[in-house]
Image (tube, grey):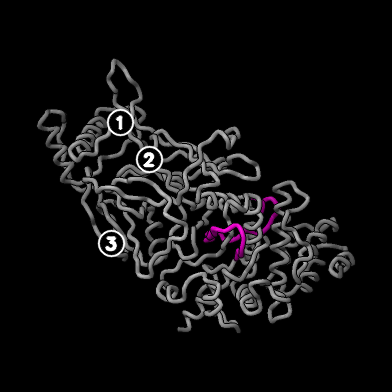
Amino acid sequence: MKKNYYMVAILAVILVIAACQKEDDISPHNIKNEPLADNAIKLGKKLENPYTVENMQKAYDNLKKDNKLKSSFQIQTTDLYVRFLPKDSTELNTLEADSLFLFDYPLDYEIEQVEYLGEELELKPKEENWYYTSVPVNYEFPDIQYEILANLFLPPEDDQESETKAISLWHDLEDEALKITGNYEVPEPDEISDSHVKRSHKHRPQGYVRVMDTYKDKYVGVEKVRVRTRRWFKYGRDYTDSNGYYSVNRRYRRSVHYCVFFKNQIGFKIRARAMSIWKAKHHVGKHNRRGYDINIGTGSRAWRFATLNNAVAKYWSLCDRFGIQKPHSNLRLVAKNASKGNSATPMLKHVWGAYGFRPKSGIASLFYKFGFIGVSYLANTFFRLCLPDIVVTSHSDKGTDKVYLTAFHELAHASHFKKVGSRYWIKYINYIITYGKKSNPYGSGTGKNAGYCGVGEMWANFCSEYFYRYNYKKSKSPEWKPDKDFYDPGFLMDAVNEIPDLSIQEVSYCLTGSVTSIPKLRDRLKIYTSDDAKIDKLYNK
């Protein structure tokens, strides 16, 4: 009961910490946007699996009978078609650490279509999620529930530009297995000659992942996200570069399914909801084996994932530019489907279990009142939660630049957390839980530990505004309020702008664990400038 109470307290923070708010450019008017999508997979009929040992043996026997095989070999199990039932995010991470290609739908079904099934699909409290994949026959299974669905014979892979006799043999065997199971498709031709389709060479899918930037009014590359391809039990993947370009690590003879996963190469992951253990993804269907350009418009659910991803990547580069402490690279971020409302940086993944929360107010009733999720549901899923670090309002109605501004604010909090640690952060958010209100999450600045909040909010408002002005070449953002609440972030902006020997990097140096009030921050700033009088004058202002 005590653990459940603390858990409610932690998650309530999501509600009550508010934030301040290599190719030519492509015109948005010349590109067909991706459809509305998460995209939920809608399965069609179950297919007969051509890669089972039994069906591969039949294909082998048929080719032998017709004298189409020039050599003999044994059909035996090389891989296993399996599914896993991880009970929580820890077990799911264990599977991912094994570099498995995990799918949340069975691989031997026809994919009828990719369709939008509604935004806030929540798991039922007792519903479990199977994840499907194939593993080598000698794979050492971890202590996670699993089931073997079929023994497979997967012909050896080749990475040849041109076809050899050995490769041709495997292609013949595979084609025959596809035919006898009713799954054969004519390979995409490379040439047409004398009305005969020549055998197709394999190609490595490549292309661009782009998202509409509403501020620039053009599509821009989605940086360092993972693109995954699949055809039956043949998988490929690659991370996009800074321009959104990818080239997966496998070749195919036929069209493949494409999916974008918002797991960034930096290490952070973006999720659709706070209660999800799976990173956000964007299914884009079956397309040419040579590659496919994925253009995410404002009507796509994936817009908020891609835009938040780019905002985080930009923050990382600005930290390098100005010498600011970067946050933990393994952040969990939630792209909240809203253009207004609260964002938050509770850093739950990092503070949970370190220290207890002991707020004065009745957290369970507050949690229920805000309607974030039912308390009974919380109890049922307590041990399965994947706790978020940051929640950002990210709907396309907000616009790209304002999503960036909000993300910069929350990430500035995460940089602060990296410097001061869990004990400091717990006092900070306990103040907000205890004294904050829905209309004013930061209170009046007079409660216990108000100084922690004052320092944190002053820094995050200042840093996000500074980065926004630099990134967008603006004199100020539309959200800038230098005298906001009791912590007046304009003090730091004036100090950096009016004192020549004081920089944003030196302001960040002041964010130590001992700086627990705004007066202490003021005094710390004097270490980095010779103009103490100017600091006092701006502070008194």
Would you say residue 438 sits in the magenta stretch?
Answer: no
Q: Which residue is mark 1?
A: 187
Rendered residue at 29%/15% (across/down): 194
Up-down relation of residue 315 to residue 181 (above or below)? below
CA distance separating discs 3 and 2: 28 Å
Front one among 110 and 496: 110
Disc 3 to disc 1, how far (Cα)?
Answer: 34 Å
Q: Earlier in the sequence, mark 3 or mark 1?
A: 3
**Which callout, 1 or 2, points at the residue further toward the start of the chain?**
1
Amino acid type assigned to the residue bearing label 3 in the image: Tyr
Q: Nearer the viewer, mark 3 or mark 2?
A: 2
Please tell me how crowded label 1 is: few (under 14), some (14-19), or many (20+) other residues with Cα within 10 Å. Answer: some
- Secondary structure state at the residue bearing disc 3: strand
Q: Amino acid at mark 1?
A: Pro
**Secondary structure type for disc 1:** loop
Q: Please tell me whether residue 237 is drawn above or below residue 490 in the rendered image.
A: above
Residue drawn 43% across the image and 40% down it: 248
Q: Which residues are magenta?
A: 317-344
Residue at 54 percent of width and 49 percent of height:
303
Q: Is residue 321 magenta?
A: yes
Horizontal and vertical percent for residue 234? 32, 43
- How far from the left and from the top, in percent, is residue 463? 71, 59
Tell me the residue that label 3 is attached to.
Answer: 146
